[in-house]
Image (cartoon, rainbow, N blue to C red):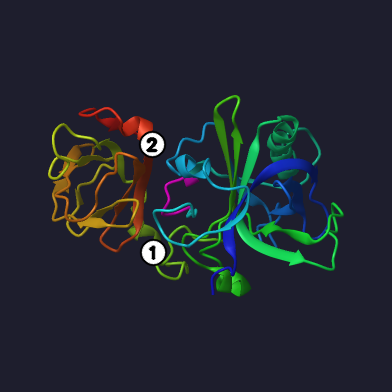
Amino acid sequence: MPIPNYGLLKGRPIDKRLGFGSNPHYQVHVIDETIDYRIAVNVKSKLSPSELLFLVDEDFDHPITQDLADAPLGFTSLTSEPGGKALDYIRGNLFDRTAMVPLPHNVPGPDNDLNEKLGYYINRAINDGSALLYAFGDRWGPETMERDKYFGFLPGNGIHDIHMNQGNVGRFVDDDGVWQDGGLLIHFEEQQQWVGIFLAFQSQAWHTDDLTGHRVETEPEQRKEGLMRIVAAMVNPLGGDVGAEAVTLVNTSPEPIDLAGWAIADKNKKIQVLTGPVVNGGEAVRIVLDGSGAQLSNKGGIISLLDSDGLKIDGVAYTRTQAKDQGWTVVF
């Protein structure tokens, strides 16, 4: 079953501990107006290979930040569905997963392991009087009779599973689910900067079932991920939107690709199934949305391209600011 108490913890970071031992987690002490919490971030996998995949985006620009600023301090339970605050590494178009790199949790030398990478941004947030930390994961506690074993506050209370939570193997398959991934976002308000930190295990799969989050096995020659790219969209057309919104695709491969049976999906997973055309290698095509399925919100959203098997081939996100000017094309 999916993780039991998925949600968002928003608070002010005040202390931290490095991750060591046989099951190391980077620990962060966070407070809201009345309650103490601990964020436990995995920095080493129990499965081989042990190094986690890591990505930091120092200029995280995604429509989800528009909603997070208004979220209350403390823990908020989230519904695991599209269109809200929940994270999904595959369906939410949060980042380019090919930019993730494997990192050990603790090795000699400066700025070359997860303890140090996480520490740089957490220390910066601790020292910044206006910075807020947003942690997505699984809540535990309150443990009314137990003090926190790292920071000593009572009751023990916090959030873990701050990583991708789908496409697992072995005993971790029971944690699979969609729209329940973990992650860290830091808002440095004075600098008007959002930093996104995302973690995944190398054993996890990047094609998962839309209902269960279980891995979908595909043969290597069937994988078309990245062969067709979303390069632009007409989100806010002049006049009415119906029949005027459009998505521009380019075939990056040398071979023709038949788009029959493929689909364009929006942030609410509404889709428009394509009847074609065949796009030659290196050529672009403009897909006009008829309004019966996928629709491009002017308040920010995501656009995904799915192949005929329903597997994600590419995905992008755009913000309200990018969509505000009528008649202008958003370029990705």
Q: Nearer the viewer, residue 177 or 241?
A: 241
Q: Is residue 293 above or below residue 319?
A: below
Res. 132 image quadrant: top right
Q: What secondary structure predominates along the stretch shown in magenta?
A: loop
What residue is shown with label 1?
Answer: 219
Q: Secondary structure at mark 2?
A: strand
Q: Nearer the viewer, mark 1 or mark 2?
A: 2
The answer to whether any part of residue 57 appears in the image is no
**Is there a contact, CB below 8 Å, between mark 1 and mark 2?**
no
Image height check: is 241 above or below 27? above
Q: Amino acid at mark 2?
A: Thr
Residue on which the image places disc 2: 319
Task: Magenta stretch: give its range.
Answer: 89-97
Regarding mark 1 in the picture, which secondary structure is present there?
Answer: loop
Q: Residue 207 lies in what quarter of the image? A: bottom left
| Residue positioned 42% across, 67% down in the render | 216
Q: Horizontally, is 188 left or right of 25 in the view?
A: left
Does residue 254 appear in the picture of this structure? yes
**Location of the C terminus (image quadrant):** top left
Residue at image position (43%, 64%) is 208
Query: Along the polypeptide, which appears first: circle 1 or circle 2?
Result: 1
